Image: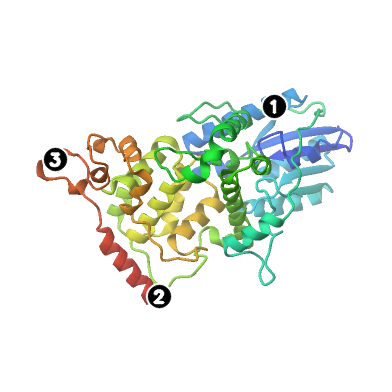
Amino acid sequence: MADRSTSIAVFNRNLRVTDNPVLAAAAESEHVVPLFVQDRDLLGSSFSNHRRQHFLNAGLADLDSSLRNLGGRLIVRRGDPVAQIAKLAAAVDAESVHVGADVSWYAKRREERLRVELGRQRRRLIVHDAVTTIQPAGTITPQSSDHFAVFTPYFRRWQDTPVRPVLPPPVRLLLPEGVRQGSVPTGQEVAGWSGGESAGCRLADSWFADGLQRYLDRQDDLAGDHTSHLSPYLHLGFVSPVQLAARALETPGTGAAAFVRQLAWRDFHHQLLAARPEAAWRDYRSRQDRWRDDDEQWEAWCAGMTGYPLVDAGMRQLAATGWMHNRARMIVASFLTKTLYQDWRRGAQFFLDGLLDGDIANNNLNWQWVAGTGTDTRPNRILNPVRQARFDRDARYVRRWVPELAAIEDPAKVHQPWRLEGAKRRRIRYPEPVIDVDHARQEFLHRRKRT
């Protein structure tokens, strides 16, 4: 049995050794057990899609390698996280268990259960904030509420709030004797994505060297794709948002400021979900009318066959890569919820099933924002997929993901193939639009006016 100076560092969405408050605090003990539990419930959910599982597995293998360089190794268990953590804590006689705070209902319930179970064993549960976000949820609040419902005033306060320092990795880790490691998964690169802290740091280095300065001017360029692509790495904690913000704030220029603003949007959605956990699946702003239910249009949207090239390009990019440009995400979400007038929950779940960075707070609350049921101060704004073509002026984005249209010379007609004349249109094996966007806009505004 180990002595009472043993701690367990639980890894969930903090799969890194640098700037990890959970690991840093646990490393103050004489013995440290770095633990990851393969959650049986999550393995059976949308999280376990093939691409995302490989991405996670590669990250776990990378984490194990990093821990070995520090003298430790990653201990892996499978099953109910609470039961597995409590069982291991008893086996090594751990004085404390360290975990990172999270905001979803599932994570909060898991934390409550773990606190009760460890309390029965007379062991301490220590929950660390600012692990998955820069500012802890609930620390920035207005006077009249427990959370900010509008981003701009939140961001003003966010900018003025001190940020914890970036933490170095532990110098050395020492495992207690006799702990069985378990099976560390192995992953592989999928659709160009390599999981893990090492891959995330390489991507961040490249982004800060070549992309950050141009970010403000080029972030909406669909074909250029000048965004950081760091969101999947932030989701699983392969990279630290605190560390990214610190690096960006040391970089002069408007690009850095725009990038930090996007990191603040992550924090905003996490603080909202922490205060209103039901908003993950329930309208944040209530509505009185009913969503339409048209399975044929829904299936066309899912397959990238709506007849609107910009919408279809975004959906096909998601299917092929597990990622979608942020501007495209807004366009396809607006099309589903405000043009086809279908429930945002269907789209949110579809994204969670397919995205590498599928995160309840950021994904679902962004869907609500676009659908007009969330925190957008202009809930009736509609992103017309034809007008949004200004973000793909030469049609390179559409030509890449909708190859049926690649041979059309005129970019305007790539985005509006229904304008092709007779025989030219018939030669293009591409569907007619599933709906008239102008008519759908009028119907949407009429519906909303009635409510």
Could you tell me residue 327's position as x and y percent? 43, 48
Front position among marks 3 and 1: 3
Label number found at residue 451 = 2
Among the two numbered marks 1 and 2 on one chain, the one whose residue lies closer to the N terminus: 1
Q: Is residue 282 left or right of residue 311?
A: right
* Mark 3 to mark 1 CA distance (whole Å): 58 Å
Label number found at residue 253 = none
Q: Nearer the viewer, residue 285 or 251?
A: 251
Amino acid found under the numbered disc labelled 1: Ser
Could you tell me residue 417's position as x and y percent? 22, 45
Q: What element carries label 2?
A: loop
Instruction: Look at the picture and state if 383 lies above or below 146.
Output: above
Disc 1: CA contacts within 10 A as few (<14), some (14-19) or many (>=20):
many
Could you tell me residue 354's position as x and y percent? 45, 42
Q: Residue reaching furthest left?
A: 423
Asked if marks 3 and 2 touch (Cβ < 8 Å), the reply is no
Could you tell me residue 268's position as x and y percent? 60, 56
* Mark 1 to mark 2 CA distance (whole Å): 55 Å
* Mark 3 to mark 2 CA distance (whole Å): 44 Å
Query: Could one spot residue 170 in this view of the protein?
Result: yes
- Residue 290 figure quarter: bottom left
Label number found at residue 424 = 3
Among the two numbered marks 3 and 1 on one chain, the one whose residue lies closer to the N terminus: 1
Amino acid found under the numbered disc labelled 2: Thr
What number of labels is visible? 3
Amino acid found under the numbered disc labelled 3: Lys
Q: Nearer the viewer, residue 412 or 338?
A: 412
Disc 3: CA contacts within 10 A as few (<14), some (14-19) or many (>=20):
few
Q: In this view, does 73 lie to the left or right of 54?
A: right
Residue receiving disc 1:
66
- Residue shown at 55% from the left, 42% from the top: 231
Q: What element carries label 1?
A: helix
